């Protein structure tokens, strides 16, 4: 090998001092900056300038002409509406990412054991293709109070009515002048007492004829054997008029399923239920007692849950968010799950661990970095939540579901616009987002260096 210092160097080898940067890199650095310049200009115009201007604007009053210092920030922590938004944001940050991450983990683990895993993941991930606006409109309909329109209450009332007895004729009431007076609890009681030798007539109105169209004709003269008390409950109405009130006329319908109680001194001593023709029969002990129609005969049908009321509006909106973002969490966690060495899981099983122990002590710890990234990403996302709350929450309860991003919009562009307060809310929201972003970036850097 030649040691002559004058010997020619190999092509492409630097002749500079050790550690010196290649001249080619220095000469082409400006080209890299030239390519970065458009992105930097856009970043400055769309990110840096709005941040700086928001900080500046937050120090002035609503008109923007008088300097008020930190007064706008003081209003944030004294105004009840903004404090509600802060509280709801805290609920969102804790609950929504936790539920979405937990469901994503559950779906990712369970779908490994089924053949149609790809189809299932596609269905779960599909809501991500729906915009927040479209999802908000959809769930506004899902949470409608009327069970005939809202899917949630349709299911809820169906389950409720399966296990709870519903009233046979909701909204019905006695015919005026029929001798029935209101009693405690919403029922009706006769003024006169029942007699075994007479027919107890209990005429009702307030029932749409179409609802009683399939009922049998009312029996005008029922009889009770053995000294009992007989009576009839019927719809005292004939389409087109011409019927005599308080009397069973031809064409009038009997009302089935109506409970009739015999009471003495306010205590029930006997009970009967009307048949298809409206006839009921009470035992002889009812002779001389008053007859009472309990309120359960006329109670309005169960209307379900007030999903968008003051109490449940925030959990209901969080549920719609989880429906959208659980698929996102599932896909990321499934990617991390695919990278776990199968030998590690098999070794744990061979050591005697059951599936729950393998999941808790092996799978979850190994997936901890991925779970952290998913959770922090969703935290950043929910801090900026706006669309779902604005669309789903009705005007009456929007203040109860308020969040910071929505309050920023309302304060800046609402009926009593104050862009000073709105800018202060924007700065506070930025200060809440930045630490979470920093944690996420550091975590990603640590993962890339492994």
Image: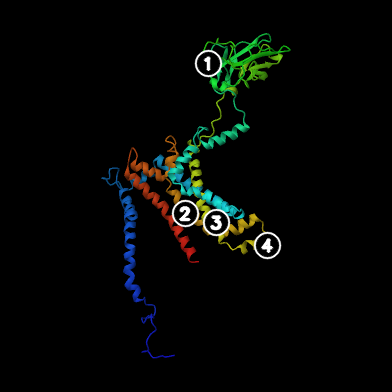
Circle 2 residues within 10 Å: few <14, some 14–19, many ≥20: some
Q: Which residue is mark 4?
A: 350
Residue 280, visible in the rendered structure: yes
Categorize mark 3 by other alpha carbons within 10 Å: few (<14), some (14-19), many (20+).
Answer: many
Between discs 2 and 3, the one toward the N terminus? 3
Q: Disc number at residue 377? A: 2
Q: Determine which residue is flagged by label 1.
A: 239
Disc 1 versus disc 2: nearer the observer:
1
Report helix, strand or loop for mark 4: helix
- Earlier in the chain: of badge 4 and badge 1, it is 1
Q: Does the CB distance between marks 4 and 1 fall below 8 Å? A: no
Q: State which tag comes first along the sequence, 2 or 4.
A: 4
Question: In the depicted view, which residue is nearer to us: 259 or 429?
Answer: 259
Q: Which mark is residue 334?
A: 3
Q: Nearer the viewer, mark 3 or mark 1?
A: 1
Structural crowding at the residue carrying mark 1, measured as other residues with C-alpha within 10 Å and reported as few (<14), some (14–19) or many (≥20) = few
Of pointers 4 and 3, the one earlier in the residue sequence? 3
Relative placement, left or right, of 293 versus 387 is right
Q: Residue furthest right?
A: 226
For the residues labelled 2 and 4, the Cα–Cα distance comes to: 36 Å
How far from the left and from the top, in percent, is residue 423?
A: 34, 47
Local SS, label 3: helix
Q: Quick check: 144 above or below 253?
A: below
Identify the residue shown where x is 48% and y is 64%. Answer: 448
Q: Position of residue 294 (x, y in %)?
A: 60, 21
Q: Which mark is residue 426?
A: none
């Amino acid at each position: 090998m030649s040691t002559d210092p004058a010997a020619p160097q190999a092509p492409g080898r630097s002749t500079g001092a050790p550690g010196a940067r290649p001249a080619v890199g220095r000469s082409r650095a400006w080209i890299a900056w030239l390519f970065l310049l458009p992105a930097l200009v856009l970043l400055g115009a769309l990110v840096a300038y709005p941040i700086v201007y928001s900080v500046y604007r937050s120090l002035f009053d609503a008109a923007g002409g008088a300097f008020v210092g930190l007064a706008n920030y003081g209003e944030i922590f004294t105004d009840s509406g903004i404090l509600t938004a802060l509280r709801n944001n805290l609920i969102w940050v804790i609950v929504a990412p936790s539920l979405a991450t937990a469901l994503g983990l559950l779906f990712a683990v369970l779908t490994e054991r089924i053949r149609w895993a790809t189809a299932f993941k596609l269905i779960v991930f599909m809501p991500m293709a729906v915009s927040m606006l479209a999802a908000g409109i959809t769930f506004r309909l899902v949470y409608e109070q009327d069970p005939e329109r809202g899917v949630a209450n349709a299911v809820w009332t169906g389950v409720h009515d399966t296990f709870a007895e519903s009233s046979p004729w909701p909204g019905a009431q006695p015919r005026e002048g029929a001798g029935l007076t209101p009693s405690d609890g919403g029922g009706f009681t006769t003024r006169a007492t029942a007699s075994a030798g007479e027919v107890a007539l209990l005429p009702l109105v307030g029932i749409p004829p179409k609802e009683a169209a399939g009922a049998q004709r009312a029996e005008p003269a029922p009889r009770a054997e053995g000294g009992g008390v007989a009576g009839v409950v019927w719809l005292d109405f004939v389409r087109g008029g011409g019927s005599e009130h308080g009397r069973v006329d031809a064409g009038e319908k009997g009302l089935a399923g109506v409970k009739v109680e015999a009471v003495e001194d306010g205590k029930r001593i006997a009970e009967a239920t009307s048949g298809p023709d409206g006839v009921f029969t009470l035992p002889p002990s009812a002779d001389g007692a008053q007859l009472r129609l309990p309120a359960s005969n006329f109670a309005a049908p169960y209307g379900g849950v007030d999903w968008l009321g003051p109490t449940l509006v925030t959990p209901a909106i969080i549920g719609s968010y989880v429906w959208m973002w659980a698929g996102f969490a599932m896909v990321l966690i499934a990617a991390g799950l695919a990278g776990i060495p199968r030998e590690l899981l098999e070794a744990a099983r061979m050591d005697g661990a059951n599936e729950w122990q393998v999941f808790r002590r092996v799978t979850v710890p190994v997936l901890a970095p991925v779970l952290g990234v998913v959770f922090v990403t969703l935290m950043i996302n929910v801090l900026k939540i706006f669309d779902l709350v604005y669309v789903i929450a009705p005007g009456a309860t929007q203040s109860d579901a308020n969040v910071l991003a929505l309050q920023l919009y309302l304060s800046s562009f609402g009926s009593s616009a104050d862009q000073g307060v709105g800018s202060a809310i924007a700065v506070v929201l930025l200060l809440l987002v930045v630490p979470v972003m920093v944690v996420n970036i550091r975590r990603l850097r640590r993962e890339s260096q492994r």
